[in-house]
Image: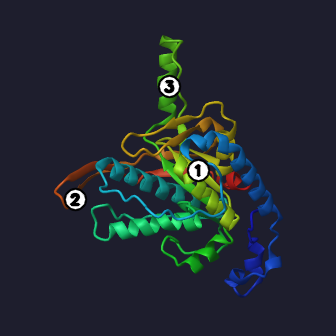
Amino acid sequence: MYDFIPCEYFLMTDDLFGFFNIRPNTVDRSETTTYIERLREAAEAAIPALNKWGIEAFKDTLEVPHRIRVPSQANTEFQRQQALGDWAEANVKDGVNQSKAEVQAVPYGDNSKMHAEDEGFRDFYKASVARTYVEGKRPDLLLLDACVEAPNDCTNLSDAETRKIVKPSIGGLEIRASRYEVQLNKEYKNARLVLNRKYKPNELTFTVKIEDLKKVYVWCVTNGKPQAYVQVFFDEVYGLSFLDILKYIGTAAKPRVNTPKRSGKSTIMVPIGLGKLIGKVTMVPDYELVDNIAKNGRHDTFAAPKGGKIEIDAAAVRSLLCQ
C-alpha cells in the first residue's frame, strides 16, 4: 500500500534501479490519497485539544522561524537518553531485518552525535532544525520491502537520493525508548492496588512530543507515506500509528501531558494499551560505563546499554503502516 512498488517489478526488469524513474501512471495513488485524507481529518479533529500548546492548525508546509534556540550544553541525562534511544533503534532495526516477513528497516532520521560544546554545533543544529520545518521530521527508520535495493544507512544521503529511497518505502518508524519493564510495572501496580483500592495507576505510555506533531504531519503529507511510533521497553515493544495518535488526541477526555521544567517541552502520554504488541526483548543488554569529558572539564558519566536482542513481528509493524 501507499505508493509501494510490488516486488514483481524488480523481478521482471533488467534495470533494478528503473523504479526511480517510474512514469506518473505507474503507481495507483488512490490508496495514498485515502490515507492522507484520513490523516487530515484526524489532525483537524485534534486541533481543539492542542490549542493550549500553540497548535492552531496543521499545515502542509511550515515557515522556518527567524530565531532558533540552540542548547548551550548536552547534560548527562540527555546523553544517557540518547544512548538508550540508539540501543532501541539498533535493536528494532535488527529485529525487523532478522524476521521472515520480507521487509527491511534502514536508518533514515538524524543520528548526529554532535553535542552543544562541540565546535560547529551551533550552525549544525540550526540547519538541522530548519530542515525539519522544510521537509518535516524524518522517522528514525524507513520500512521497505526486502526486494527493494537500498543502502544500509540512509541518514547521510543527498535530498535527491533520499527521495528515491522514500518513494518505494512502506512508511517510517519513530523509535522511542523507555526505562521500564512492562510486566514488572504491571505486577507492582497490581500489588499496590490490592493494598489500596483508591490507588489509581497510570498505564505506561507512548511518549509523543507535542512540538513534533506538526513536523511529522508535514513529512507524511509531503511524501504520501504513513508513520508509526514504536515504544521500546526492556521486555516488550509496542507500536501505534501516527494516524491513531492524532485520533486519540482528538477524542481523549483528558490526555496526560508531561512538561519537564528544564526543557519546557511538553509530551503527550498515549497509553500503550491503545497500541499493538509488536516485539519482545529476548536477550537483555549488557551495560558499558561511559565517561564523556566536556571542554569545560565536566564529566558526564552514565551506563549505556549494549547488545541484547529484540524479536520483532515485522508483519505486525507493517500492519501499523498499512491502515
Q: Going by the image, does 248 lie left or right of 129?
A: right
Task: Give the percent coordinates (x, y) of residue 189.
Answer: 49, 23
The first of marks 1 and 2 along the sequence is: 1
- In the foreground, 90 or 223: 223
Label 1 – label 2 distance at C-alpha: 33 Å
Q: Residue at x 32, y 71 (%)?
A: 120
Q: Earlier in the sequence, mark 3 or mark 2?
A: 3
Tag 3 secondary structure: helix
Distance between mark 1 and mark 3 Cα atoms:
25 Å
- Amino acid type assigned to the residue bearing label 1 in the image: Tyr
Q: Residue at x 80, y 58 (%)?
A: 34
From this view, report whether residue 99 is shown above or below residue 187.
below
* Mark sitting on residue 294: 2
Question: Percent from the top left, x then y, of residue 254?
Answer: 61, 31
Callout 1 secondary element? strand
Residue under label 1, please give it: 229
Q: What is the quadrant of the N terminus in the image? A: bottom right
Q: Is residue 126 above or below residue 240?
A: below
Tags 1 and 3 in contact by the CB under 8 Å rule?
Answer: no
The span from disc 3 to disc 2 (Cα, nearest Å) is 41 Å
Tag in front: 1 or 2: 2
Compared with residue 231, is residue 91 higher up or lower down, i.e. above or below? Answer: below
